[in-house]
Amino acid sequence: MTVLDELRAGAEDFLLLIISSPSGAGKTTLCRKLRAEFPSLTFSVSHTTRKPRPGEQDGREYHFVDRPTFERLVEAQAFAEWAEVHGNLYGTSFAEIERARTNEARGIIFDIDYQGARQIRQRVPDAAAVFILPPSFTVLEQRLRNRASDDDETVRRRLAKARTEIEHYALFDYLIVNEDLDRAYDQLRSIVLAEGARRLRKATLAEVLLRTGALPTG
Ligand code: 5GP
């Protein structure tokens, strides 16, 4: 039984939130704001075979590994989901989700692509999934070109991939258009709050209330 099977089986007050988007839609900025406002939510650190960008640190943005190491982890069934994105392999380890649960986080946020979203949802159907849309392909291209870290070829590859990613919008519960950052963030934080309340409404808490007459505070 994996940690995801346990989460599906139990009525646990633990939020699984998937946030996905084509690169350049502003997901990283939105996630940074979430991290600041909701410190009780842990961000899943994926494994990847991509080379670190300037400023990225092993174990913080990603666990950077080579392809043979990644393939060994796949073989050992260490991943809750994994996929090839833009020619590199990316995956979420079960250990990462375990870590969030044992650290007493209230939930975990996955910044993963639609292929990963599909795999997590298949294992835990009530994981919440949000997709961030750019207001237009022109804006998306501008944002990608403004990123000094990526070369021309990378930008072109990512743009071509954006359409495919957006075509998978139907896998997601929520769509947010990131035209105005503040407005987009307002919607995202409302989703987190509402999803938290959805879990709090679940049977366990109501049962505690019925049995003991009061709920623990906090
Ligand atoms: P980047 O290389 O720009 O950090 O990420 C590229 C894409 O890979 C993003 O769309 C990101 O959401 C996705 N990604 C990052 N980690 C994972 C993961 O663990 N699994 C999957 N399926 N996609 C991931």
Image (cartoon, rainbow, N blue to C red):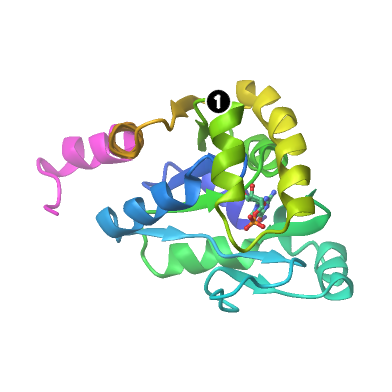
- Our reading of the magenta stretch's main secondary structure is helix
Residue carrying label 1: 136
Q: Quadrant of residue 20?
A: top right
State the SS at label 1: loop
Q: Is residue 87 above or below residue 178?
A: below
| Quadrant of image for the C terminus | bottom left
Give neighbour class at mark 1: few <14, some 14-19, many 20+ (Cα, 10 Å).
few
Q: Residue at x 53, y 39 (%)?
A: 25
**Left or right of 178 on screen, residue 84:** right
Instruction: Mark yes or no: residue 124 visible.
Output: no
Q: Nearer the viewer, residue 203 or 3?
A: 3
What amino acid is found at the position of numbered circle 1 in the picture?
A: Ser
Name the residue nearer the viewer: 211 or 155. 155
Picture quarter with the N terminus: bottom right
* Res. 168 image quadrant: top right
Q: Residue furthest bottom?
A: 58
The x and y percentages for residue 189 are 30, 39
Name the residue at 34% across, 51% down.
34
Task: Specify whether residue 217 is painted magenta.
Answer: yes
Q: Is residue 13 above or below residue 90?
A: above
Magenta residues span: 193-218
Disc 1, ligand 1: is the CB inside 8 Å? no
Q: Toward the viewer: 99 or 47? A: 47
Q: Residue at x 36, y 36 (%)?
A: 188
Residue 17 included in the magenta stretch of the image: no
As drawn, is 186 to the left or to the right of 107? Answer: left
